[in-house]
Image (cartoon, rainbow, N blue to C red):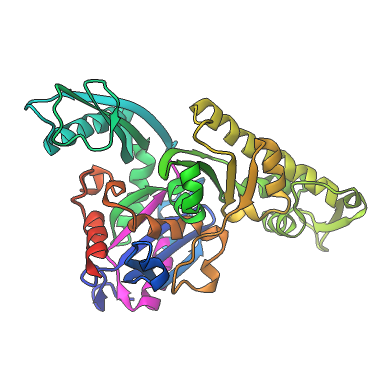
Amino acid sequence: MDRHNGHNARRSGLVAILDVGTSKVCCMIAKPVPAPHHLAETGQTTQLRVIGFGHQRSQGIKSGVVVHMDAAEQAIRAAVDQAERMAGKIIEDVIVSVSCGRLKSDVFSAGIAIASESVRQNDIDKVMTAGREYAERDNRLVLHLLATGYRLDEDDTVNDPRGMIADRLSVDVHAVAADHPPIRNLMLCVERCHLSVAGLVAAPYASSLSAISDAEAKLGVTCIDMGAGTTGISVLADGQFAYCDAIALGGNHISLDLARHLSTPLEEAERIKTLHGCAFAAASDEGEIISYPVMGEHDVPQFNETSKAQIAQLVQERIEEILETARDRLESAGVRDVAGQHIVLTGGASQLAGLSNYAARIFSKSVRLGRPRHLPGLPEQGVGPAFTTATGLLQYVMREPAEIGPCSQTRMLTTGTGYLSRVGQWIRESF
């Protein structure tokens, strides 16, 4: 679609998201509509309806990192064009998921002396700025900066200190940051497609917003999003975002293990994983023989055989590494008490047979497979676990203003003065 003609999405109040993953690039365009009666009764007056959807096989991306700018740009352009044609709109801004750059949570406290007798909004802005400056040390880029509680003169935590008398204001902060260079390359790739980055959202956080229910988030729950190149980890507790991490391992690594061990093309290894891969080997699997082509220069195609049990063994070794790494990250982060007794698995690689049972054994917790929340207008091909992050980006837009805090590098402030915050406010006030 000609980007210089057609209907402009920003003027129409539309929201566009872009999920740039290792296996696929997905673009969704949505518009706010009145919420149905059963949601309006809970206080939700609006929801987003998907009017444009596009996804393409990813190119030039490895473990969430841009490794070939031209190839990645081409995939993004194709996905965006597909979504624009379906919507009949031209988009200018996109909210982009981030899984690269050693994504990591950091929890700390920041404090300042109060200039006047009581706490004002200016004091809150100053202490949050101090927190951001600390989180941005070592050339890190802050994606999310959330105040988890305020303290006055080191007393008990308060939710809103404005108007209260104190000599010193402190804030407990949860910051999610990543290395700047890989994110800047991702942004540059998007900008080369003549799009502005309206916001950056940690992919594990977006996935949790889509796969986890409000009741689970209140009690404490861990979401593990197993993608093709990365595995995202997020924890929600008391309804708030409490922890985030990402591991540079995913479903593609299982396929690579199979390809290398069996000496078969990667495409065939992916097929074997999808049809025969399992986290557990049954007794009958020893007798089930699988035939597959082997690589080499042969005039006549050559085939080899292996048992389904051997396939399961190879799959299990990599699954065990991914899940144990996730478990160890949670342990070392000290979030055991808030992580809850429940695990939600989602993402394209989570559909592997037997995975939930194997994860329950690794974590010693109950495990369920999570699917993205329903979005009206979303085509059937976009409702599977592989699209959890993409749908979660739209859920993020509908959150409260306090949770919309994109990085300053995208010309927006934590206080919510940027385009994404204005869209969120417009949605909340439109109906």
Furthest residue in direction front, as rendered:
41
Residue at the (57%, 55%) spot, across then down = 370
Furthest residue in direction right, as rendered:
287
Q: How many marks?
A: 0
Residue at the (44%, 74%) spot, across then down = 377
Q: Viewer-proximal residue, 150 or 64? A: 150
- Left or right, 135 with respect to 389, comes to left
Q: Position of residue 75 (x, y in %)?
A: 45, 62
Q: Magenta residues?
A: 76-100
Q: Quadrant of the N terminus?
A: bottom left
Furthest residue in direction left, as rendered:
116
Q: Is residue 216 visible?
A: yes
Q: Position of residue 197 (x, y in %)?
A: 29, 54
Q: Is residue 65 visible?
A: no
Q: Position of residue 189 (x, y in %)?
A: 35, 53
Q: Quadrant of the C terminus?
A: bottom left
Q: Is residue 247 magenta?
A: no
Residue at the (51%, 60%) spot, across then down = 372
Q: Position of residue 85 (x, y in %)?
A: 38, 77
Above/below status of 166 relative to 377: above
Q: Image quadrant of residue 192?
A: bottom left
Q: Viewer-proximal residue, 61 or 27? A: 27
- Left or right, 146 with respect to 306, comes to left
Above/below status of 397 relative to 340: below
- Left or right, 90 with respect to 101, comes to left
Q: Viewer-proximal residue, 299 or 414? A: 414
Q: Image quadrant of residue 163?
A: top left
Residue at the (31%, 47%) spot, across then down = 403
- Left or right, 148 with respect to 289, comes to left
